[in-house]
Amino acid sequence: MTEESGHMSTAIVVGGGIIGLSCAIRLRQRGFRVVVIDEARPVKPASWGNAGHIAVEQVTPLATLDVIRSAPRRLFGLTGGPLDIGWRYVGTWLPWCLRYLRASLPLRAAQGHVALRAALAQAMPEWRAMVADLQAPDLLIENGHLMVWGEGHDPSAAMRTVMESDLGTASARLMDSAELAGVATRMGVRPLSGLVFSGTAQVRSPGAVLETMQAHLTLDPDCHRREQHVTRVASASGGVQVTLQDGSVLKGDKVILAAGVRTSDLVPGWRPPLIAERGYHIEWDHGGIPEGPPVVFADRSVIVSMFGTRMRASTFVEFTHADAPPDIRKWEWLEKTVEKAGLPVRSGFSRWVGCRPTLPDYLPAIGPVAGLPGVIAACGHQHLGLTLAPLTACIVSSIAAGDAVPDVARPFCPNRF
Protein backbone atom coordinates (compact mmCIF):
# COMPACT_ATOMS: atom_id res chain seq x y z
CA MET A 1 0.00 0.00 0.00
CA THR A 2 1.54 3.29 -1.06
CA GLU A 3 0.40 6.34 0.86
CA GLU A 4 -0.28 9.69 -0.76
CA SER A 5 3.16 10.88 0.34
CA GLY A 6 4.71 8.10 -1.70
CA HIS A 7 5.91 6.28 1.42
CA MET A 8 5.52 2.51 1.35
CA SER A 9 3.83 1.32 4.54
CA THR A 10 5.62 -1.32 6.60
CA ALA A 11 3.97 -4.36 8.13
CA ILE A 12 5.87 -6.33 10.77
CA VAL A 13 4.79 -9.97 11.01
CA VAL A 14 5.65 -11.59 14.34
CA GLY A 15 5.85 -15.32 13.67
CA GLY A 16 7.20 -17.28 10.73
CA GLY A 17 4.89 -20.28 10.71
CA ILE A 18 2.20 -21.04 8.16
CA ILE A 19 -0.03 -18.18 9.37
CA GLY A 20 2.75 -15.59 9.46
CA LEU A 21 4.20 -16.51 6.07
CA SER A 22 0.76 -16.54 4.44
CA CYS A 23 0.07 -13.09 5.87
CA ALA A 24 3.44 -11.82 4.63
CA ILE A 25 2.67 -12.98 1.08
CA ARG A 26 -0.74 -11.30 1.01
CA LEU A 27 0.58 -8.10 2.62
CA ARG A 28 3.21 -7.80 -0.09
CA GLN A 29 0.46 -8.12 -2.68
CA ARG A 30 -1.30 -5.20 -1.00
CA GLY A 31 1.84 -3.10 -1.39
CA PHE A 32 3.33 -3.29 2.10
CA ARG A 33 7.01 -3.58 2.81
CA VAL A 34 7.15 -6.62 5.10
CA VAL A 35 9.46 -7.72 7.90
CA VAL A 36 8.96 -11.25 9.22
CA ILE A 37 10.37 -11.89 12.69
CA ASP A 38 10.76 -15.51 13.66
CA GLU A 39 12.85 -16.82 16.51
CA ALA A 40 15.08 -19.87 16.22
CA ARG A 41 13.50 -22.90 17.90
CA PRO A 42 15.03 -26.12 19.19
CA VAL A 43 11.88 -27.95 18.03
CA LYS A 44 10.07 -27.39 14.74
CA PRO A 45 6.63 -25.75 15.23
CA ALA A 46 3.12 -27.06 14.61
CA SER A 47 3.22 -25.55 11.12
CA TRP A 48 5.81 -28.20 10.26
CA GLY A 49 4.60 -31.08 12.45
CA ASN A 50 0.91 -31.28 11.53
CA ALA A 51 -0.74 -34.04 9.48
CA GLY A 52 -0.91 -31.95 6.29
CA HIS A 53 -4.70 -32.32 6.12
CA ILE A 54 -6.86 -29.46 4.81
CA ALA A 55 -9.70 -30.16 7.23
CA VAL A 56 -12.67 -28.25 5.80
CA GLU A 57 -14.98 -30.91 7.27
CA GLN A 58 -14.20 -29.91 10.87
CA VAL A 59 -16.90 -27.25 11.07
CA THR A 60 -17.96 -27.99 14.65
CA PRO A 61 -15.62 -26.46 17.25
CA LEU A 62 -14.41 -28.78 19.99
CA ALA A 63 -16.02 -26.53 22.61
CA THR A 64 -19.28 -28.46 23.04
CA LEU A 65 -21.03 -30.30 25.84
CA ASP A 66 -20.81 -33.53 23.82
CA VAL A 67 -17.02 -33.30 23.79
CA ILE A 68 -16.98 -32.65 27.53
CA ARG A 69 -19.20 -35.68 28.20
CA SER A 70 -16.91 -37.91 26.13
CA ALA A 71 -13.71 -36.72 27.82
CA PRO A 72 -13.44 -39.42 30.54
CA ARG A 73 -13.46 -42.27 28.04
CA ARG A 74 -10.79 -40.56 25.96
CA LEU A 75 -8.25 -39.95 28.76
CA PHE A 76 -4.81 -41.33 28.02
CA GLY A 77 -4.14 -42.34 31.61
CA LEU A 78 -7.44 -44.26 31.99
CA THR A 79 -8.23 -45.72 28.59
CA GLY A 80 -5.17 -45.08 26.44
CA GLY A 81 -7.16 -42.46 24.55
CA PRO A 82 -5.87 -39.32 22.82
CA LEU A 83 -6.71 -36.79 25.58
CA ASP A 84 -4.24 -36.02 28.37
CA ILE A 85 -3.93 -33.34 31.03
CA GLY A 86 -0.65 -32.24 32.61
CA TRP A 87 -1.71 -32.27 36.24
CA ARG A 88 1.60 -30.76 37.34
CA TYR A 89 0.68 -27.60 35.41
CA VAL A 90 -2.84 -27.03 36.76
CA GLY A 91 -2.23 -23.29 37.00
CA THR A 92 -1.63 -23.20 33.25
CA TRP A 93 -4.79 -24.90 32.04
CA LEU A 94 -7.40 -24.50 34.81
CA PRO A 95 -8.30 -20.84 34.05
CA TRP A 96 -8.51 -21.78 30.37
CA CYS A 97 -10.80 -24.72 31.17
CA LEU A 98 -13.25 -22.49 33.05
CA ARG A 99 -13.56 -20.32 29.95
CA TYR A 100 -13.85 -23.45 27.83
CA LEU A 101 -16.81 -24.67 29.88
CA ARG A 102 -18.62 -21.37 29.31
CA ALA A 103 -17.84 -21.48 25.59
CA SER A 104 -19.32 -25.00 25.42
CA LEU A 105 -22.79 -23.95 26.54
CA PRO A 106 -25.35 -24.58 23.77
CA LEU A 107 -25.88 -21.01 22.55
CA ARG A 108 -22.19 -20.13 22.30
CA ALA A 109 -21.36 -23.53 20.83
CA ALA A 110 -23.99 -23.02 18.13
CA GLN A 111 -22.66 -19.56 17.35
CA GLY A 112 -19.15 -20.97 17.09
CA HIS A 113 -20.36 -23.66 14.71
CA VAL A 114 -21.93 -21.10 12.39
CA ALA A 115 -18.81 -18.94 12.45
CA LEU A 116 -16.36 -21.78 11.80
CA ARG A 117 -18.53 -23.26 9.07
CA ALA A 118 -18.57 -19.95 7.22
CA ALA A 119 -14.80 -19.62 7.42
CA LEU A 120 -14.09 -23.19 6.33
CA ALA A 121 -16.38 -22.72 3.32
CA GLN A 122 -13.80 -20.22 2.03
CA ALA A 123 -10.71 -22.20 2.99
CA MET A 124 -10.32 -24.31 -0.15
CA PRO A 125 -10.76 -21.46 -2.64
CA GLU A 126 -8.16 -19.45 -0.74
CA TRP A 127 -5.76 -22.40 -0.78
CA ARG A 128 -6.17 -22.72 -4.54
CA ALA A 129 -5.44 -19.02 -4.93
CA MET A 130 -2.37 -19.27 -2.69
CA VAL A 131 -0.70 -22.16 -4.54
CA ALA A 132 -1.48 -20.45 -7.86
CA ASP A 133 0.23 -17.27 -6.68
CA LEU A 134 3.20 -19.31 -5.46
CA GLN A 135 3.30 -20.99 -8.90
CA ALA A 136 3.33 -24.30 -7.05
CA PRO A 137 -0.02 -26.00 -7.76
CA ASP A 138 1.47 -29.38 -6.83
CA LEU A 139 1.56 -28.30 -3.18
CA LEU A 140 -2.20 -28.86 -2.92
CA ILE A 141 -3.56 -32.37 -3.49
CA GLU A 142 -7.36 -32.46 -3.67
CA ASN A 143 -7.99 -36.15 -3.25
CA GLY A 144 -10.05 -36.14 -0.05
CA HIS A 145 -9.25 -38.46 2.84
CA LEU A 146 -10.36 -41.76 4.33
CA MET A 147 -11.69 -42.78 7.73
CA VAL A 148 -11.50 -46.45 8.64
CA TRP A 149 -12.38 -48.79 11.50
CA GLY A 150 -10.48 -51.99 12.05
CA GLU A 151 -11.22 -53.42 15.46
CA GLY A 152 -13.54 -53.31 18.45
CA HIS A 153 -17.33 -52.99 18.28
CA ASP A 154 -19.48 -52.73 15.18
CA PRO A 155 -18.67 -49.28 13.73
CA SER A 156 -22.01 -48.87 11.91
CA ALA A 157 -23.40 -46.41 14.45
CA ALA A 158 -20.18 -44.37 14.46
CA MET A 159 -20.11 -44.21 10.67
CA ARG A 160 -23.77 -43.20 10.54
CA THR A 161 -23.09 -40.41 13.05
CA VAL A 162 -20.26 -39.08 10.90
CA MET A 163 -22.27 -39.17 7.66
CA GLU A 164 -25.25 -37.45 9.31
CA SER A 165 -23.15 -34.72 10.91
CA ASP A 166 -22.46 -31.31 9.39
CA LEU A 167 -19.36 -31.67 7.21
CA GLY A 168 -19.49 -28.21 5.67
CA THR A 169 -18.42 -28.27 2.03
CA ALA A 170 -17.16 -31.85 2.34
CA SER A 171 -19.14 -35.07 2.05
CA ALA A 172 -18.69 -38.70 3.13
CA ARG A 173 -19.89 -42.02 1.75
CA LEU A 174 -19.40 -45.67 2.61
CA MET A 175 -16.26 -47.33 1.30
CA ASP A 176 -16.92 -50.23 -1.07
CA SER A 177 -15.10 -53.57 -1.00
CA ALA A 178 -12.67 -52.57 -3.74
CA GLU A 179 -11.72 -49.45 -1.83
CA LEU A 180 -11.24 -51.43 1.36
CA ALA A 181 -8.95 -53.79 -0.56
CA GLY A 182 -7.09 -50.77 -1.92
CA VAL A 183 -6.38 -49.58 1.62
CA ALA A 184 -5.05 -53.04 2.44
CA THR A 185 -2.75 -52.98 -0.60
CA ARG A 186 -1.38 -49.55 0.19
CA MET A 187 -1.32 -49.52 4.00
CA GLY A 188 -0.74 -53.19 4.77
CA VAL A 189 -3.90 -53.55 6.84
CA ARG A 190 -7.46 -54.21 5.65
CA PRO A 191 -10.08 -52.26 7.62
CA LEU A 192 -13.44 -53.76 8.50
CA SER A 193 -15.24 -50.74 7.09
CA GLY A 194 -14.66 -47.12 6.25
CA LEU A 195 -15.74 -43.82 4.76
CA VAL A 196 -14.48 -41.89 1.76
CA PHE A 197 -14.46 -38.10 2.18
CA SER A 198 -14.66 -35.75 -0.79
CA GLY A 199 -14.04 -32.01 -0.75
CA THR A 200 -11.07 -32.18 1.62
CA ALA A 201 -7.40 -32.09 0.63
CA GLN A 202 -3.83 -32.38 1.81
CA VAL A 203 -0.56 -30.59 1.15
CA ARG A 204 2.41 -32.34 -0.42
CA SER A 205 4.07 -31.88 2.95
CA PRO A 206 3.88 -29.15 5.59
CA GLY A 207 7.64 -28.66 5.31
CA ALA A 208 7.41 -28.21 1.53
CA VAL A 209 4.73 -25.54 1.97
CA LEU A 210 6.85 -23.57 4.44
CA GLU A 211 9.97 -23.86 2.27
CA THR A 212 8.09 -22.70 -0.84
CA MET A 213 6.62 -19.70 0.98
CA GLN A 214 10.00 -18.77 2.46
CA ALA A 215 11.68 -19.03 -0.95
CA HIS A 216 8.95 -16.88 -2.52
CA LEU A 217 9.47 -14.15 0.06
CA THR A 218 13.26 -14.36 -0.06
CA LEU A 219 13.18 -13.37 -3.73
CA ASP A 220 11.21 -10.22 -2.88
CA PRO A 221 13.45 -7.20 -2.17
CA ASP A 222 10.70 -5.60 -0.08
CA CYS A 223 10.38 -8.53 2.29
CA HIS A 224 12.98 -9.18 4.98
CA ARG A 225 13.33 -11.82 7.68
CA ARG A 226 14.87 -11.38 11.13
CA GLU A 227 15.66 -14.29 13.41
CA GLN A 228 15.01 -12.79 16.82
CA HIS A 229 12.85 -13.19 19.89
CA VAL A 230 10.22 -10.47 20.28
CA THR A 231 9.80 -9.19 23.84
CA ARG A 232 7.19 -6.47 23.41
CA VAL A 233 4.72 -5.06 20.89
CA ALA A 234 3.11 -1.66 21.41
CA SER A 235 1.20 1.03 19.59
CA ALA A 236 3.16 4.23 19.27
CA SER A 237 2.69 7.68 17.84
CA GLY A 238 2.22 7.21 14.11
CA GLY A 239 2.54 3.44 14.09
CA VAL A 240 3.70 0.42 16.07
CA GLN A 241 6.90 -0.61 17.81
CA VAL A 242 8.34 -4.10 18.14
CA THR A 243 11.09 -4.59 20.70
CA LEU A 244 13.52 -7.44 20.13
CA GLN A 245 15.54 -9.40 22.65
CA ASP A 246 18.78 -7.75 21.56
CA GLY A 247 17.29 -4.38 22.56
CA SER A 248 16.65 -3.09 19.07
CA VAL A 249 13.28 -1.58 18.20
CA LEU A 250 11.54 -1.90 14.86
CA LYS A 251 8.96 0.66 13.83
CA GLY A 252 6.17 0.02 11.36
CA ASP A 253 2.67 0.99 10.36
CA LYS A 254 1.07 -2.37 11.19
CA VAL A 255 2.08 -5.38 13.22
CA ILE A 256 0.59 -8.85 12.72
CA LEU A 257 0.59 -11.13 15.78
CA ALA A 258 1.07 -14.66 14.44
CA ALA A 259 3.41 -16.12 17.06
CA GLY A 260 1.18 -19.00 18.10
CA VAL A 261 0.87 -19.67 21.80
CA ARG A 262 3.63 -17.12 22.52
CA THR A 263 1.37 -14.32 21.25
CA SER A 264 -0.23 -13.93 24.69
CA ASP A 265 3.07 -12.66 26.15
CA LEU A 266 3.74 -9.93 23.60
CA VAL A 267 1.31 -7.05 24.09
CA PRO A 268 0.85 -5.19 27.39
CA GLY A 269 -2.88 -4.67 27.86
CA TRP A 270 -3.97 -7.61 25.72
CA ARG A 271 -3.47 -11.17 26.90
CA PRO A 272 -5.56 -13.67 24.94
CA PRO A 273 -6.26 -16.91 26.86
CA LEU A 274 -4.18 -19.13 24.60
CA ILE A 275 -3.12 -22.57 25.74
CA ALA A 276 -0.51 -24.94 24.35
CA GLU A 277 -2.61 -27.88 23.21
CA ARG A 278 0.20 -30.23 22.30
CA GLY A 279 0.19 -32.91 19.64
CA TYR A 280 2.66 -35.72 18.91
CA HIS A 281 3.75 -37.48 15.76
CA ILE A 282 6.15 -40.16 14.64
CA GLU A 283 7.51 -40.51 11.12
CA TRP A 284 9.30 -43.24 9.18
CA ASP A 285 10.16 -44.52 5.69
CA HIS A 286 7.41 -46.67 4.23
CA GLY A 287 9.45 -48.46 1.59
CA GLY A 288 7.95 -47.01 -1.58
CA ILE A 289 4.25 -47.90 -1.44
CA PRO A 290 1.79 -46.04 -3.73
CA GLU A 291 0.80 -42.58 -2.56
CA GLY A 292 -2.72 -41.92 -1.37
CA PRO A 293 -4.86 -39.64 0.77
CA PRO A 294 -4.58 -39.32 4.55
CA VAL A 295 -6.21 -42.12 6.52
CA VAL A 296 -7.91 -41.55 9.86
CA PHE A 297 -7.91 -44.70 11.98
CA ALA A 298 -11.05 -43.79 13.90
CA ASP A 299 -10.85 -46.51 16.54
CA ARG A 300 -7.31 -45.44 17.40
CA SER A 301 -7.76 -41.63 16.99
CA VAL A 302 -4.70 -41.55 14.73
CA ILE A 303 -4.31 -39.88 11.33
CA VAL A 304 -1.66 -41.31 8.98
CA SER A 305 -0.35 -39.17 6.13
CA MET A 306 2.15 -39.85 3.36
CA PHE A 307 4.71 -37.28 2.28
CA GLY A 308 6.82 -38.76 -0.50
CA THR A 309 8.80 -41.67 0.92
CA ARG A 310 7.80 -40.80 4.48
CA MET A 311 4.74 -41.77 6.48
CA ARG A 312 3.55 -39.77 9.53
CA ALA A 313 1.19 -40.84 12.32
CA SER A 314 -0.25 -38.02 14.44
CA THR A 315 -2.49 -37.85 17.49
CA PHE A 316 -3.00 -36.58 21.07
CA VAL A 317 -4.58 -33.54 22.63
CA GLU A 318 -2.34 -32.73 25.58
CA PHE A 319 -3.13 -29.78 27.83
CA THR A 320 0.06 -28.73 29.56
CA HIS A 321 2.69 -26.02 29.74
CA ALA A 322 4.27 -25.13 26.41
CA ASP A 323 7.75 -25.90 27.73
CA ALA A 324 6.89 -29.07 29.65
CA PRO A 325 9.12 -32.06 28.81
CA PRO A 326 7.64 -34.39 26.17
CA ASP A 327 5.82 -37.46 27.43
CA ILE A 328 7.84 -40.33 25.98
CA ARG A 329 4.96 -42.74 26.62
CA LYS A 330 2.96 -41.08 23.85
CA TRP A 331 5.63 -41.71 21.22
CA GLU A 332 5.94 -45.29 22.44
CA TRP A 333 2.16 -45.69 22.20
CA LEU A 334 2.18 -44.39 18.63
CA GLU A 335 5.03 -46.71 17.65
CA LYS A 336 3.26 -49.74 19.11
CA THR A 337 0.00 -48.70 17.43
CA VAL A 338 1.68 -48.39 14.02
CA GLU A 339 3.34 -51.77 14.38
CA LYS A 340 0.15 -53.43 15.67
CA ALA A 341 -1.83 -52.02 12.74
CA GLY A 342 0.61 -53.59 10.28
CA LEU A 343 1.56 -50.35 8.53
CA PRO A 344 4.68 -50.61 6.35
CA VAL A 345 7.72 -49.57 8.40
CA ARG A 346 11.12 -49.67 6.70
CA SER A 347 13.16 -47.48 9.05
CA GLY A 348 13.40 -46.27 12.60
CA PHE A 349 10.96 -43.68 13.91
CA SER A 350 11.60 -39.97 14.26
CA ARG A 351 9.66 -38.17 17.00
CA TRP A 352 8.06 -34.73 17.26
CA VAL A 353 5.93 -32.79 19.74
CA GLY A 354 4.49 -29.32 19.15
CA CYS A 355 2.00 -26.77 20.46
CA ARG A 356 -1.32 -25.98 18.86
CA PRO A 357 -2.31 -22.46 19.96
CA THR A 358 -5.88 -22.83 21.18
CA LEU A 359 -8.45 -20.39 22.56
CA PRO A 360 -11.27 -21.59 24.88
CA ASP A 361 -14.00 -21.49 22.21
CA TYR A 362 -11.83 -23.24 19.60
CA LEU A 363 -12.12 -20.27 17.25
CA PRO A 364 -9.17 -18.18 16.05
CA ALA A 365 -8.46 -14.57 16.91
CA ILE A 366 -8.32 -12.61 13.65
CA GLY A 367 -8.65 -8.85 13.38
CA PRO A 368 -7.64 -5.52 14.92
CA VAL A 369 -6.92 -5.49 18.65
CA ALA A 370 -9.15 -2.87 20.29
CA GLY A 371 -7.29 0.01 21.91
CA LEU A 372 -4.05 -0.79 20.09
CA PRO A 373 -4.04 1.00 16.73
CA GLY A 374 -2.09 -0.83 14.08
CA VAL A 375 -2.03 -4.16 15.94
CA ILE A 376 -3.76 -7.05 14.15
CA ALA A 377 -4.16 -10.55 15.62
CA ALA A 378 -3.80 -13.78 13.63
CA CYS A 379 -3.51 -16.53 16.21
CA GLY A 380 -5.39 -19.29 18.06
CA HIS A 381 -6.12 -21.54 15.07
CA GLN A 382 -5.97 -24.77 17.14
CA HIS A 383 -6.11 -27.79 14.77
CA LEU A 384 -6.92 -25.61 11.75
CA GLY A 385 -3.84 -23.45 11.28
CA LEU A 386 -2.85 -25.09 8.01
CA THR A 387 -6.45 -25.16 6.79
CA LEU A 388 -7.24 -21.52 7.54
CA ALA A 389 -3.85 -19.91 6.83
CA PRO A 390 -4.60 -18.47 3.36
CA LEU A 391 -8.03 -17.20 4.42
CA THR A 392 -6.55 -15.62 7.54
CA ALA A 393 -3.93 -13.92 5.38
CA CYS A 394 -6.61 -12.54 3.06
CA ILE A 395 -8.54 -11.12 6.01
CA VAL A 396 -5.45 -9.67 7.72
CA SER A 397 -4.06 -8.00 4.58
CA SER A 398 -7.46 -6.49 3.84
CA ILE A 399 -7.75 -5.02 7.33
CA ALA A 400 -4.16 -3.75 7.23
CA ALA A 401 -4.91 -1.96 3.96
CA GLY A 402 -7.77 -0.10 5.61
CA ASP A 403 -10.75 -2.17 4.53
CA ALA A 404 -13.58 -2.97 6.94
CA VAL A 405 -13.44 -6.20 8.91
CA PRO A 406 -15.18 -8.75 6.64
CA ASP A 407 -18.29 -10.45 7.95
CA VAL A 408 -16.60 -13.85 8.05
CA ALA A 409 -14.04 -12.54 10.56
CA ARG A 410 -16.38 -10.68 12.93
CA PRO A 411 -16.95 -13.70 15.23
CA PHE A 412 -13.17 -14.01 15.61
CA CYS A 413 -12.74 -10.60 17.28
CA PRO A 414 -9.51 -10.73 19.33
CA ASN A 415 -11.14 -8.90 22.26
CA ARG A 416 -14.06 -11.27 22.72
CA PHE A 417 -12.68 -12.72 25.96
Image: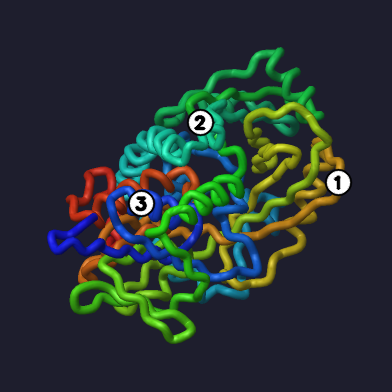
Q: Is residue 207 left or right of residue 382?
A: right
Q: CA distance from mark 3 to mark 2?
A: 29 Å
Amino acid on which the number 2 mark rests in the picture: Thr
Residues at circles 3 and 2 in contact by the CB criterion of under 8 Å: no
Amino acid on which the number 1 mark rests in the picture: Ser
Quarter of the image where the N terminus is located: bottom left
Residue 20 to residue 58: above or below: below
Amino acid on which the number 3 mark rests in the picture: Leu
Q: Position of residue 91 (x, y in %)?
A: 51, 76
Q: Is residue 274 left or right of residue 315?
A: left
Nearest the viewer among 14 and 187 is: 14
Q: Residues within 10 Å of mark 1 (few under 14, many from 20)?
A: few
Q: Residue at x 30, y 62 (%)?
A: 376
Q: CA distance from mark 3 to mark 1?
A: 46 Å
Visual colour scheme: rainbow
Nearest the viewer among 359 and 285 is: 285
The disc, 3 or 1, on the residue closer to the chain's N-terminal end is: 3
The disc, 3 or 2, on the residue closer to the chain's N-terminal end is: 3
Q: Residues within 10 Å of mark 2 (few under 14, many from 20)?
A: many
Q: Quadrant of residue 221?
A: bottom left
Element carrying mark 1: loop
Residue 101 appears in the picture as rendered: no
Quarter of the image where the C terminus is located: bottom left
Disc 1 marks which residue?
Answer: 347
Q: CA distance from mark 2 to mark 1?
A: 30 Å
Which mark is in front, 3 or 1? 1
Residue 200 has which mark? 2
Disc 3 marks which residue?
Answer: 105
